[in-house]
Image (spheres, rainbow, N blue to C red):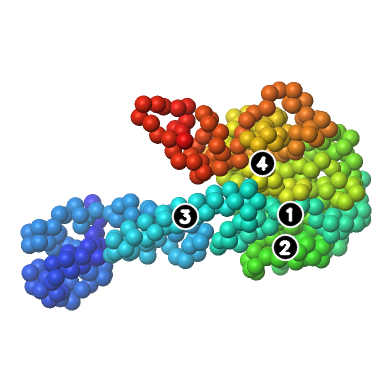
Amino acid sequence: MAERKIFAGPKVRRIRNALALTQTAMAEALEISPSYLNLIERNQRPLTVQLLLKLASVYRVDLEELRGQTGGGLDQLKEIFADPLLSGELPGDQELVEVAEAAPNAASGMIKLYRAYREQAARLSDLTALMAAEGHAPVAAGRLPLDEVREALERRSGYFGRIETAAEAFAATLPWGVDLAAGLKDWLRSERGIAVRVLPVHVMPDLRRRFDRHSMRLFISERLSQADRAHEISIEAATLALLPAIDAELADLSLSSAEARRIARFELARIAALALTMPYEAFLSAAKATRYDIDILRARFGVSFGHAAARLAMLQRPGAAAIPFFLIEIDAAGHRLRRAGAQGFPHARFGGGCPKLNLHAAFLQPGQILAETVVMPDGASFLTVARTLEGPSVEFGERVRRTAILIGCDAALGEGVVYGQAMALDPVAIGPACRLCERRGCLSRAEPPVTRPLGLDEMVAGLSAFDFQ
């Protein structure tokens, strides 16, 4: 079996520089030409067995050091350049390998600097949330376009009047005697010349939806449920039919970059699709009649649980409003995917970052609806309803994508909601987030509060690993 070639030019160069040798001097000691040593240091020639032995005998070099890999530094550099801020900077990992090998001290400094940046960003985020909760203006900080869009949508009401009006007018032109997906397919074909086709997994393995401008065909993945297929078709139709209304609402968001506006346009198209599949007056009437029973609403309108819940958080038309709901969606690792609210997401009053919320417990009971009342440290209480959402179908061996959604409202309004029966049970004491919560003895605490010093005592061990004074 052929031995693996060893390219260790940067390591040879470090040895030479540490000894303050010129290439000529080292080449003479190794009995090779300076030009050949230059090629070795530039990784254009491998180290031969004879050279390895010569290096070991002349300079007392550990052969394992020359044969070894770049170690954990390379993995940490890969993690750094996977950050959204830097993910597009490098075409591959080769440059990282060269940095880790040629300049390990510089690589170590880069890793330390990145860790400091992440720590300061986390502290700034916590302090910003704390200041916002106390009524102070938030601290300005550099944001990614996606973060800017999320913040803009979370601050404002979920009701977009121009989109709602345009969606109702457009929906009135569709033949509602058949299912919505069929009506939208007919409209796309007759009005825009676009044919809709469902493609198998092996043809479109990585996409939910793709529009081919050349053949004028809209491709939908067979991985999606019938409700999700209809939603993707609705997004395409809304993008075409409701574009003036979407652009008008987009202008009101006052975003700072073209990339942020592009992301927001897509988010508004998804909102328009919900308004199209669940027209405002019809959905509001059904919601009130069913006392906001999401399962009944999703069955009546042929949508998913998540779409029906999101639509409930949008019903705030002046003079014709529903109970003001808010919602959060997370994945199994706790990453926030979206937050929205009929009156803007209630950051200061609710937070949404407490591990005791039924939002996290929902993963232990997939498909089940969990309802409970929660109470904040300041006495504010909310009715919360949580359930898991299933992602696209997967092939054998793939991990199922499962998220959880929580929809909530002030407990004072809970009597008008079918899930208000849960209010007969004792409320669950929660906080805004561990870093901002000062509840003592919490078994679920994952981090110490930034507002209090840790109260570590060798003689006492509390229920939490982060006891504080």
How far is mark 1 from mark 4, CA to CA? 16 Å
Q: Are marks 2 and 1 in contact (CB under 8 Å)?
A: yes
| Residue marked by disc 3 | 120
From mark 2 to mark 1, how far is it between C-alphas?
Answer: 9 Å
Which mark is first along the chain, 3 or 2?
3
Helix, strand or loop at label 3? It is helix
Q: Quadrant of residue 432?
A: top right
Place of residue 87 in the rendered image (x, y in percent of width and height, measured from the top left): 49, 61
Question: Which label number is shown at residue 350?
Answer: 4
What's the mark number on residue 302? none
Q: CA distance from mark 3 to mark 4?
A: 24 Å
Q: Amino acid at mark 1?
A: Arg
Q: Is residue 85 left or right of residue 316?
A: left
Q: Which residue is mark 2?
A: 253
**Label pair 3/4, CB-CB below 8 angstroms:** no
Q: Residue at x 65, y 37 (%)?
A: 378
Earlier sequence position, callout 3 versus callout 4:
3
Q: Of label 3 and label 1, which has the lower sequence position?
A: 3
The residue where tag 1 is placed is 156
Alpha carbons under labels 2 and 3: distance apart: 28 Å
User: In the image, what residue occupies the spot 49% across and 57% down?
Assistant: 83
Q: Earlier in the sequence, mark 2 or mark 1?
A: 1
Q: Nearer the viewer, mark 2 or mark 3?
A: 3
The answer to whether 21 is drawn above or below residue 377 in the figure is: below
Q: Which amino acid type is marked by label 4?
A: Phe
What percent of the width, then of the height, locates residue 183? 86, 51
Secondary structure beneath dot 2 equals: loop
Q: Position of residue 199 (x, y in %)?
A: 68, 51
